[in-house]
Image (cartoon, helix red, strand yellow):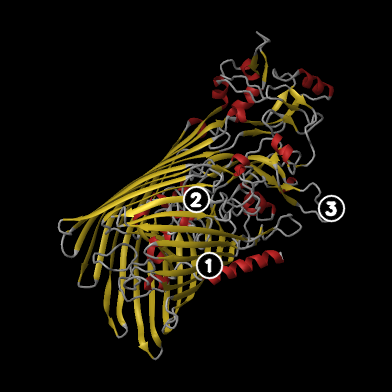
Amino acid sequence: MSQIRRYESMAAVSMLAMWAALPATAVAQETTAQPAASQAAQEPVTTGDIVVTGTRLQNAGFDAPTPVSVVTAEQIQRAAPATISDFVNQIPALSGSNTPRTNKALIGNGLAGANLLNLRNLGVSRTLVLMNGKRVTPTTLTGAVDVNTLPNALVKRVDIVTGGASAAWGSDAVAGVVNFVLDTDYEGLKGNFQSGISTEGDASNLTGSLSYGKAFADGKGHFLVSGQYTRNGSATYGSRDWFKAYKIVNNPLAGQPGETTFLAAPWTAQFLNETGLVASGPLAGYYFDPNGNLAGTDFPLANRTGNGTFYFGDKAVFDRLYDQSPFTQSSVPTTQKSIYARASYDLTDNINAYVEGSYATSKAHTRGANYGRSGASFAPVALDNFYLPEEVRSAMIANGLTTLPLNVQNTKMGVIGVGNRRKSYRGLVGLDGSFGGDWKWSAYYQYGRVDSKIRATDMPRPDQYLLAIDAVANPVNPSQPICRSTLTNPTNGCVPMNPFGSQALSPAVLNNVIGVSAQDIRYEQHVAAANLAGNLFELPAGPVSFAAGAEYRSEKAHATADPISQRTGFWAGNFKAFDGKINVKEVYGELGVPVFKDSAFGRSLDLNVAGRLTDYSVSGSVKTWKAGFRYEPIDGVELRLTRSRDIRAPNLQELFQAGSTVNTLVNDPVNGNTPIRAFATVSGNTNLTPENADTLTAGIVLRPSFLRGFRASIDYYDIKIKEAIATNSAQFIVDRCFAGDAQFCTAITRNSANVITAISLQPFNALQERARGVDIEVSYTMPIADGTFDVRVLANYVDKLDIVLPTSVITRAGEVSNNVGAAEGVPHWRATASATYDSSAFTAQLRGRLIGSAVFDDNWGPTVIDKRTVPAIFYLDAYLGIKTNSIAPKSEFFLAVDNLLNQDPPVVVQLDASNTQAAGTNPFLYDVIGTTIRAGFRFEF
C-alpha cells in the first residue's frame, strides 16, 4: 500500500509541476475579448457578446458566482478525439458516463453506442445537456442526450456548470449543466477528416465533418449547414494481454487462517462447455464431444465454487470451458450520421428570426450472451432421452439416476445480438430581439422526435428449449426422435433437439427454440420558451440586472413489443408495450445586484439570486432557488459562494415503462452465496415524486497581477439529494435485503424452498445520495519565440459519494468496484494535465491523465476479498499538428496518440454476479483499448 501511495504522489506532483488544466470560470471569461458572464442560452442579436452558462443575466459587467469550466474548440482539436464526447468525458468532474467502450452487455436498455454525460457520477439523468442554452431532444426515455448527435464541428465552446443549476436552467440540472455553444455566425468552408486504430489492429474509428456558412441579403441573412459521419469499430476483452477473465468467486478455503471470504480469481468461468458436461452427482466429470458422444469421464473438478457453478484459476481448463467474457465487446461497433442546418434573417434592426433543424441516425450492435444452462433444473436429460449415449444410460441406471444434470453453453443456438437503431429529428423556430438599449428578449418553439428500434436476435425461448431437448423415440418409428410433449399434444409444433454436442442445428430446430425480441419506441417532445433580460436601474456600483422567462415542455412515448416478449416467452428482453406522457410548466426570475465597486471594503461585491416555479403534470409543483455572491477584496483575488435547491422529476422510463424481463444470476447470501438464476423485471412506478437536492459551492479564484498569464481556482461542492430516485441491480437488492434493509426484501420473491425466483427492479424514492469534493483548475501561459507555451492542470477530489439507506450508508468515494447498483464508485483523485506549444508552424502537446489509487469496495475489508487495493494509473497522450497554407489558408495535418505508454487497466472484478461477461476491470474509469493512433487533416477556407 505504501508503494501505491508513493506512486500516486509522484504522479500527482509531476502533473502539478506541468501546471494547469482547463481554465477556471473567471479564467475562461477573461481570456475572451470582453470578459463577461451572461446568458448562456443563445447568441444575442448584437455581435461580440460573450456568453457563459453560469447565469442568464445579460449585463456584460456581471460575473456570476457559479463555477463554470470552459472547454474551447482549440483545446478539443489538440486532442483530435474521434468524437467530442471522448474529450469532454476526460474532464475529472465527469465520471461514469455511458460510451461505446462501457458496454455491459445489457439487452434491454437501448443505450448501446450512445455517449451520455454523467457529472459528479450522480447519473446521466441528473446532467442537463443544452445546445446554445436550449434543451436538446433526449435520445432515450431517461432524458439523457447522445452528445455525438450534436453538430460537433460547429462547437466553439463547451460550458460545464459544476454546481446545481435548476433555478436558472430547469429540471434535471441536479449535478449541473453541459452547454454546447455553437458558432452560429460561422462563414466559410471547413472540414475535418481523421482515422484511427489501436495498436492491436482493432477499435478503429473514422470521422468526417464538413461545414459551410455564408451571409446573404447584404448581411441581413445567414445560412449554415454542417454534416458529420462517425464510425467506431469493434474490439473484445479477450484480444488484450491484460485480460485474465477475473471474476469474483466464493473462496473454498474461507474460514481457514489467512483466507478471505471471496477471491478475485483469474481464469474464472461458469462450469459450462459447448458440448455438455456433468458437474454434480455420481457422474460428475462426464463430458461429451462435438458429435454428442461421451468423450470422457474425467473432466477436472477441482477449483470449483458454488456447487460447481464456477471454475477458476487454471487457464488450460478455462480454455476447455466456454466463457462469455473474452468475446464481450470492449468497443461497440457504432455508426452515426447527422446533419444540422440553420438560417437566420434580420427582420428589423432589433429583431432576428431564425429556423434550425437537425437529423441524426445511430446504429450500434452489441454482442450478447449464449444460452448457458446448468444443472437438473435447467437442462434435465431423462433416462429415456433419444440422444443419450448408451454407455451414459447404463451408468445412470447403475447409479440409480432418472435424470442427468447437464451443463452446456448452447453456442449452436447462436449468440444473442442486440441491434439498436435510432433516428432523431429536431426542428426549431425562434426570434431574438432587443429594445431600450440593453434589454434583450427571445422566444422559440422546438419539436423533437426520436424513433428507436431494439432487436435482440437469436434470443432463446426457455419453454420451447425444455420441450425440444426432452426428446424420446417416436413410437411409430423408433429410429426417429419426437418431443415427449408432442405425444400428448400432436399440434404443438415442437421440434426435437439434441442437448449434447455442438453440431449445427437445422433451421426447423432453430426456429423453434430462438426468436427475435423486439421493441419500437417513439418519443416526442414539444418545448416553447420565452426569455427577457436587461438592466433595471443603476446603482453606484453598476446596473441591477434582471432576467425572467417561462417554458412549457411536453413529452410522450409510445412503445410496442413483439407477441412473445409480451407474454415473457424469451430468456431475456421480453419488452412490453406502454404509453406515457407528461408536461412541465416553468417560470423563473434572476437578479444580479452590484453592492459596491472600488470601495474601502474591496474591489467589488456582486449578489446573485434566482428562483423557479415548476409544475409537473404527474407529481405537482416544486420550487427551486439559488443565492450567491462574488467578492473581490483585492485585485487578482475573487471569492465566490452559491447555495441552491435543485430538482429532478421522474422521467418517462421511470414512470411508465411496462417492464422488460431478463434472466439474471445472483449470489444469494441467505443460502451461502450460492449463485441462483432468477427473472428480474424492470418496470416503471407512477407513484414516484421529484427528488430535490441542496447544493453548496464555495471557491476562490486567483489571477495575480505580478504573475501574468497565471490563473487558478479551487471550488468546494456539497450536493445532498433527498428522495433520490433509483433503480438498483438485482444483486444490490439481494445484498441490501440480507444486510437488514427491509424495503428491499419486498422486491424479492422466493419459493417454498426459500430459493429466489423473481426480483422486481422498480424505481422508488427510498434513497438519499450525497456528493462532496473539491475542483481545482490552474493554468499558466507564456509567450515563447513566435508562439505560446501553455501548461494546465484540472483535478477533482471526491470526499463523499454516498448512498444513504435506512439502516446503513454505502460509500462509493475512494472505491472503483464495477457494480450495476445505484452509483458507480470513483477514486478520491482524478486529474488531467497538458503542456502545449502552439506556433504558426506547428502545435505540440503532451497530456497526462491520473486516476488515483483506491480500494475495491470500502465496505469490504482485508478479510473479505484478496485483491482489495487498486493502484493509481497514469496515462500519457500526445498530439502533433503541422500547419500548412499550401492546401487551404488554414489547414493542418495532425497525429494523435492516446495511452502512449500502453498502460494496462488494473484488476477490478464485477460485484454483480449476473455479469458473467465482465472485463475484470472497470471500463467506466480505465482504458480497456490500449494505445490508439489517429491521423487526420483539417482545413478551413
Residue at 66% over, 30% down: 274
User: In this image, 386 relative to 720: left or right?
Assistant: right
User: Which residue is denoted by mark 1 in the rendering?
Assistant: 795
Q: Is residue 915 above or below residue 567?
A: below
Disc number lying in front (2 or 1): 2
Q: In which quarter of the image is the N terminus?
A: bottom right
Of pointers 1 and 3, the one earlier in the residue sequence: 3
Where residue 553 appears, x then y in whole percent? 35, 54
User: In this image, 151 relative to 880: left or right?
Assistant: left
Label 2 to label 3: alpha-carbon separation: 49 Å
Disc number lying in front (2 or 3): 2
Three-letter code for the amino acid on which mark 2 is drawn: Ile
Closest to the observer, 53 or 299: 299
Residue at 51% over, 56% down: 123
User: Which residue is denoted by mark 3 in the rendering?
Assistant: 256
Badge 3: how crowded within 10 Å, few (<14), some, or many (20+)? few
User: Which residue is denoted by mark 2 in the rendering?
Assistant: 933
Q: Is residue 171 above or below residue 422?
A: below
